[in-house]
Amino acid sequence: MRIITGKARGVRLATLPGEDTRPTAERVKEAMFSAIQFNIEGRTVLDLFGGSGQLALEALSRGADRAVVVDSNRKAAEIIRANSIKANLFSQCRTVCADWRDYIKQNAGREQFSLLILDPPYKDGFLDEIIKRVRGADLLTEGAIILCESAEGGIPTPPDGYTAKVYRYGKTYVTILRSEVDII
């Protein structure tokens, strides 16, 4: 697993051994970021299920300003920090070891993000629940992009004011939710 392009291009990233996390396949990650490539520059990123941090670090490498990467697993948080250091992106990347629900509650209305990355455990309806909570906590800026990875049954329903574009890569689905304000 590596960072595909940008200022940290080619940096190899560590991941947790075993099956505790499910790293995004490189071709899926490439497709995800190609779909939003002209909308990454200057964005603030929130990745609520960080794993290795690869998705947030890819966004930073491609020009995002800063990222907060959340994971409830202490060992995953340590790997995210180590990967951000290795990629020379540590100063732009804050790692938080917390449950996603706790992070949302503690930061409601305190900071906002313009790119939300969601790659949680695959479960039907889970992305809809997460998106509802994040929006209810006022964590997204106007015009925020929501980038989701799921199985077929977990494809999120676009919330009010958003449109969805869904891509399929084998059994993996990528949904990009964009504010209708930005589409006009």
Image (cartoon, rainbow, N blue to C red):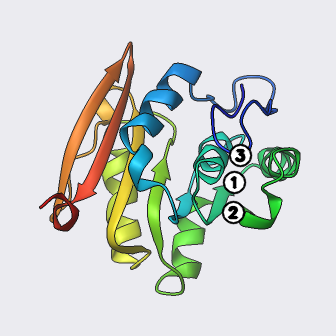
| Disc assigned to residue 98 | 2
Judging from the image, what secondary structure is the residue with disc 1 in? loop
Q: Using residue 81 as the reference point, say whether residue 144 is left or right of it.
A: left
Mark 1 or 3: the one toward you:
3
Q: Mark 1 near mark 3, Cβ–Cβ under 8 Å?
A: no
Q: Residue furthest bottom?
A: 110
| Disc assigned to residue 7 | 3
Q: Amino acid at mark 3?
A: Lys
As displayed, is residue 44 above or below residue 19?
below
User: For the point 53% across and 81% down, which residue is it?
Assistant: 111
The x, y position of residue 132, in whole percent, is: 32, 64
User: For the point 81% across and 59% down, which residue is it?
Assistant: 90
Q: Amino acid at mark 1?
A: Ser
Q: Using residue 143 as the reference point, say whether residue 17 is left or right of it.
A: right
Q: Using residue 86 as the reference point, say whether residue 20 is left or right of it.
A: left
* Residue under label 1: 72
Q: Amino acid at mark 2?
A: Ala
User: Upstream in the sequence, badge 1 or badge 2?
Assistant: 1
Q: Mark 1 near mark 2, Cβ–Cβ under 8 Å?
A: yes
User: For the point 32% across and 44% down, which residue is it?
Assistant: 176
Judging from the image, what secondary structure is the residue with disc 2 in? loop
Rendered image quadrant of residue 17: top right
User: Upstream in the sequence, badge 2 or badge 3?
Assistant: 3
Residue 64 vs residue 151, the one in the foreground: 64
The x, y position of residue 167, in whole percent, is: 29, 28
Judging from the image, what secondary structure is the residue with disc 3 in? loop
User: Upstream in the sequence, badge 1 or badge 3?
Assistant: 3
